[in-house]
Amino acid sequence: MNMGRKTTYLTDFILGLFILLFITLVVRKVGSLGEAGSVGARHWIVYVVFPLLGATALLLSFATKQRIRIWLACGLIGFMAIGYALDLSLLIIKWRAGTQLPKDKQRLLAAAKKAGQIIDTRTPLELLDDLRNKGQQIVPLVTPGTILRMRNQPLVADAKVMPLAGLSSVRTILCNESGQYIFFESDEHGFNNPRGIHSAAGPFDIAVIGDSFAMGVCVPPEKTIAAYLRAFYPKTINLGYADAGPLLYLATLKEYGLPLKPKVVVMFYYSGNDFEASYRELSYPILAHYLMPTFSQGLRHKQSIVNSFLTEIEHAEEQRARANRVEANKPWLTSGSEWRRLASLSHLRESVGLDHRGDSLAPEVFLRSLKQVLVEMKRTVESWRGSLIFVYLPHYGELEDYNLNRGERNSILGLANEVGIKAIDAHALFSQQTNPFKIFPYGLPSHYNEMGYSVLSEAIREQVVSSR
């Protein structure tokens, strides 16, 4: 076989491999559409449109001269070599930074030192080990979002229930955003309330529903929004839980709020991640069933099953965290996980926001889903003649730049108005403060502090008074 024929075969083989790679990208991305209906336009263009165009162009190239195909093959190989060189550079930078504390922890340490505060630098796993070694019964925070991220694993895929809160009646590690860890004693259904509250005689005054902000991250239990409101309305219950989104709010209302029939339900929408959370939630079929008026898992009567399942999840997550700690302590040259990430250009894709884990709903799909949730929440609350209040919570960046996220903010608030729900715009509320960044610990990006929750609670209380 002469050299020209060998070159032709090698060139065509390389082009065939790239065609296969492009088709694989398209199949993977299109396959994910069935989970949640749609993804963001940028992911669609990068993982579907470009690969289809690339595969088509390469197929057409087989009708061209050999010289053109050789140029194409060399160009593709060079382009891939540049990609891997960049990814390797990012990996080395990450490895060198691995001996240092994360940047957010460094900023926290600097701010706390300036304020004369002591910082607990232990990781949650180190804290867990220390407290258990002292004989304390304590568990880490296991969230509904954790379960949804594990939805393709047999442990979750074969589960009999979808929990909406954490392990019940146990001391739980909540968070550390101000320097010291915050704990809470979970109630009989895993929420951040005084124990026994679910069995109190109704009707209740207020139910607070939402994600980590409603739950009370990252302040002591007596400083949460529900605790502030409880001082004026004793029968106030906190049904918020971290890492949740709109469909989980609806599910929580139906499972735990409906039996208590609170006069007022306060639903929080957080602009920082509720959009992304909806993608996970729509990927889990059982949650979509809550859009039907009569659906329920009957979770109030299945706490032992819920606890058993959550214990398995907690053990699996703990094992994963320990394995990750071992892997993180290895030199990157001997780390199998880092080599796998390098092979998929994971570091480079993450740096430009094109990691597969960044999938989210297209805006129109999200707004349609949110409207369905709000309509069903309103119908449910009004079925016992209660009233629903919607609260828009801004993230740190929105207070830095008023116009950031302005379109989405107006769309969300407009949607609540369209459905006929009274709304509180916490962005406008916080912007009125002399220094709005005082609502964050040390003025750094995180959850709100005690001051933030206090300001928000007062606005909610005023809205409750006017709605009666």
Image: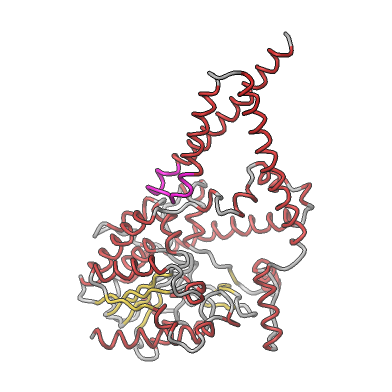
Front-lying residue, 306 or 404: 404
Q: Residue at x 48, y 68 (%)?
A: 242
Q: Main secondary structure of the magenta part?
A: helix
Quarter of the image where one finds residue 366: bottom left
Residue 30 drawn in magenta: no
Q: Is residue 28 above or below residue 464?
A: above
Quarter of the image for residue 421 reads bottom left
Residue 119 lies, with reference to residue 244, above or below; the image says below
Q: Nearer the viewer, residue 148 or 296?
A: 148
Residue drawn 72% across the image and 53% down it: 327
Q: Is residue 459 placed above or below 372 in the rendered structure?
A: below
| Rendered location of residue 384, percent (x, y) | 21, 73
Q: Is residue 248 left or right of residue 312?
A: left
User: Front-most of 468 and 409?
Assistant: 409
The quadrant of the picture occupied by the N terminus is: top right
x, y percent for residue 343: 67, 41
Q: Residue 146 in the image: x percent, y percent? A: 51, 59
Task: Residue at 29%, 85% (x, y): give it.
Answer: 464
Residue at position x 34%, y 58% in the image: 297
- Which residue is situated farthest in the bottom direction here? 232
Q: Quadrant of the C terminus?
A: bottom left
| Segment colored magenta | 32-45
Which of the two residues, 397 or 125, is positioned nearer the viewer here?
397
Residue 344 is left or right of residue 167, and the answer is right
Q: Where is residue 74 drawn, in percent x and y? A: 67, 30
| Colour pattern of the rendering | secondary structure
